[in-house]
Amino acid sequence: MLLAIAIFLLAGLAEIGGGYLVWQWLRESRPWTFGLAGSLILVLYGIIPTWQSFPSFGRVYAAYGGVFIILAVLWGWLVDKKSPDFYDWLGAGICIIGVSVMLWAPRA
């Protein structure tokens, strides 16, 4: 279970970090190297989820979506300095409950 969580976290950081660098390049007039680095990191993001041991692509990506939401809230708070409000945290909590149900519910 810890490996699955670590892979989700790594994928999320790659997706958010890569997207952030592309955003900086296109929206904040940073050098083209930001865009290139962000693009390469986004390619890596596409590879990382394949390391999961879960057999279903759809389930892995659906569960990852919940993890992504939580990481995006944290990124906004820590990097963009935009404090999440009660509803941001409530939504993130609901997402993590959904992720847990999807991945670890007993199945026949």
Image: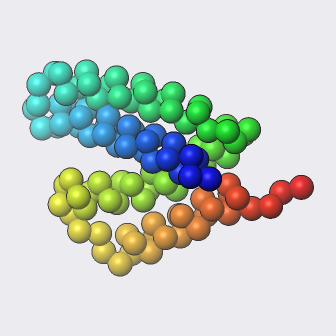
Residues 64 and 8: in front is 8
- At x 73%, y 38%, the residue is 55
Relative vertical location of residue 77 with respect to residue 53 in this rendering, above or below: below
Quadrant in which the C terminus appears: bottom right
In which quarter of the view is residue 30 placed?
Answer: top left
Whole-percent x, y for residue 20 in the image? 26, 40
Whole-percent x, y for residue 47 in the image? 51, 27
- At x 17%, y 60%, the residue is 81
In which quarter of the view is residue 21 placed?
Answer: top left
Relative vertical location of residue 81 with respect to residue 24 in this rendering, above or below: below
- For this view, does 37 lie left or right of residue 13? left
Residue 58 appears in view: no
Whole-percent x, y for residue 66 in the image? 52, 56
Q: Residue furthest front?
A: 2
Relative vertical location of residue 91 with respect to residue 43 in this rendering, above or below: below
Report the number of discs: 0
- For this view, does 28 lie left or right of residue 107? left
- At x 21%, y 63%, the residue is 82
Whole-percent x, y for residue 15 in the image? 39, 39
Relative vertical location of residue 98 with respect to residue 50 in this rendering, above or below: below
In which quarter of the view is residue 106 placed?
Answer: bottom right
Residues 5 and 39: in front is 5
- For this view, does 16 lie left or right of residue 46? left
Residue 22 appears in view: yes
- For this view, does 53 lie left or right of residue 40? right
Q: Residue furthest bottom?
A: 86
